[in-house]
């Protein structure tokens, strides 16, 4: 880790964080068990609207340098 470059560090950190997020999403899926939980379509829509919003915000951070600038 001491001699890793920015690309190697990104790969290491991003893989770990992505896998952590994917595991949390799988765990969230356990809440879909109607035998254990009571929820409405509105509850589900709120959860996924927030997840979608955060995903879009983070994706924009990655793409910020690639957005075209307005020119006349």
Image: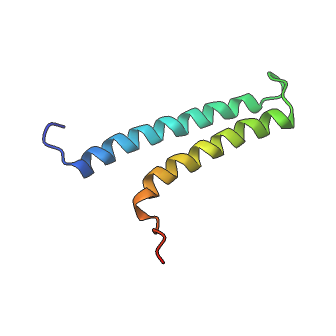
Residue that sits furthest to the bottom in the current view: 72
Q: Please name the residue shown 39% across and 38% down the image.
A: 16
**Residue sitting at 80 percent across and 21 percent down?**
36
Which quarter of the image is occupied by the N terminus?
A: top left
Q: Residue furthest top?
A: 36
Q: From the top left corner, tell me how far across and down residue 57 is, in percent.
A: 55, 47
Left or right: 10, with 71 as reference point: left
In this picture, is 71 found above or below 54? Answer: below
x and y percentages locating residue 2 in the rendered image: 14, 37
Lateral position of residue 71 relative to residue 53, left or right: left
Residue drawn at the location 54% of the way across and 40% of the way down: 22
Left or right: residue 53 versus residue 40 is: left
Q: Is residue 34 left or right of residue 51?
A: right
Q: Nearer the viewer, residue 50 or 24?
A: 50
The residue shown at (58%, 42%) is 54
Residue 14, given in percent of the width and then of the height, sits at 38, 44
Q: Quadrant of residue 47?
A: top right
């Amino acid at each position: 880790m001491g001699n890793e470059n920015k690309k190697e560090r990104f790969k290491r950190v991003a893989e770990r964080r992505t896998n952590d997020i994917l595991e949390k999403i799988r765990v969230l899926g356990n809440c879909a068990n109607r035998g254990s939980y009571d929820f409405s379509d509105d509850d589900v829509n709120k959860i996924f609207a927030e997840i979608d919003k955060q995903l879009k915000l983070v994706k924009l951070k990655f793409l910020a340098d690639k957005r075209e600038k307005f020119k006349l």
